Image: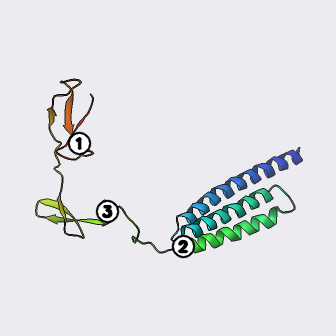
Amino acid sequence: MRKMVRLALAVSGLFLLGLLMIGTTGWGVLAIYYSDLESPALRVAFAGTFGLLALIALIGLASRRWRRRMLIGYTVLFIILVAWWSTIKASNDRAWQPEVAVLPYATLEEISSRFTTSETSTIAARPTSPPPITTKPSICDSSTPWISSPSTGWGRTSRIPF
C-alpha cells in the first residue's frame, strides 16, 4: 500500500514538474523571440535552441538515470535566461504605427481639458454628455435609429440595432 502511495506521489510530482517546465519553456521561448536582439534570425535561432534544450530536458525526466542531470541543466539554463531578460532596458524606440508613435499627455486649462502630444497637434476633449439619437433614412428600413458613438468618432454615425 505504501509503495502505491509513493508511486502515485512520484508520478503526480513528475507530472506537475513537467507542467512547470512546459510553462517556463513557453515563457522563455516568447521572451527570447520578442527580445531586443537586433537580428530576427538570431532571435528565432536562440528561441528554437532554448525550446529544443527544454524539450530534451523534459524527455530526460522520464529516465531515472538522467532525471537529476536534466533538471539541474534546465534550471541553470532558465536562471541564465531570467538573468539576461532582467538586464533588458525598457524602451519606446520601436517601429510604432504613426497614430501611436508619440506618447500623449493631458493638461488642464481652466474648465476644459485638452489632450496634447509632444508634437504640435492639440485635440479637444470629447464632451461628457452622450450624443443625441437621430434618425436617418436607410435603404433597408427607414425606422432604424442612428447614433454617434466613440468607436466611429463623434459626428460620424453608425447603425445600432435595438
Q: Which mark is residue 149?
A: 1
Foreground tag (3 vs 1): 3
- Answer with mark 3 or mark 1, whichever residue precedes in sequence: 3
| Residue at image coords 76%, 53% | 14
- Mark 2 burial class by Cα count in 10 Å: few <14, some 14-19, many 20+: few
Residue 119: where, in percent of width, then height? 23, 70
**Amino acid type, mark 2:** Ser
Residue 111: where, in percent of width, then height? 11, 60
| Residue at image coords 17%, 64% | 108
Helix, strand or loop at label 2? It is helix
Q: Which mark is residue 86?
A: 2
The quarter holding residue 146 reads top left
- Mark 3 burial class by Cα count in 10 Å: few <14, some 14-19, many 20+: few
C-alpha gap between disc 2 and disc 1: 42 Å
Q: Which mark is residue 98?
A: 3
**Amino acid type, mark 3:** Pro
Proximity of marks 3 and 1: CB atoms separated by less than 8 Å: no
- Answer with mark 2 or mark 1, whichever residue precedes in sequence: 2
C-alpha gap between disc 2 and disc 3: 29 Å
The quarter holding residue 21 reads bottom right
- Mark 1 burial class by Cα count in 10 Å: few <14, some 14-19, many 20+: some
In front: 120, or 130? 120
Colour approach in the figure: rainbow
On screen, residue 86 above or below 128: below
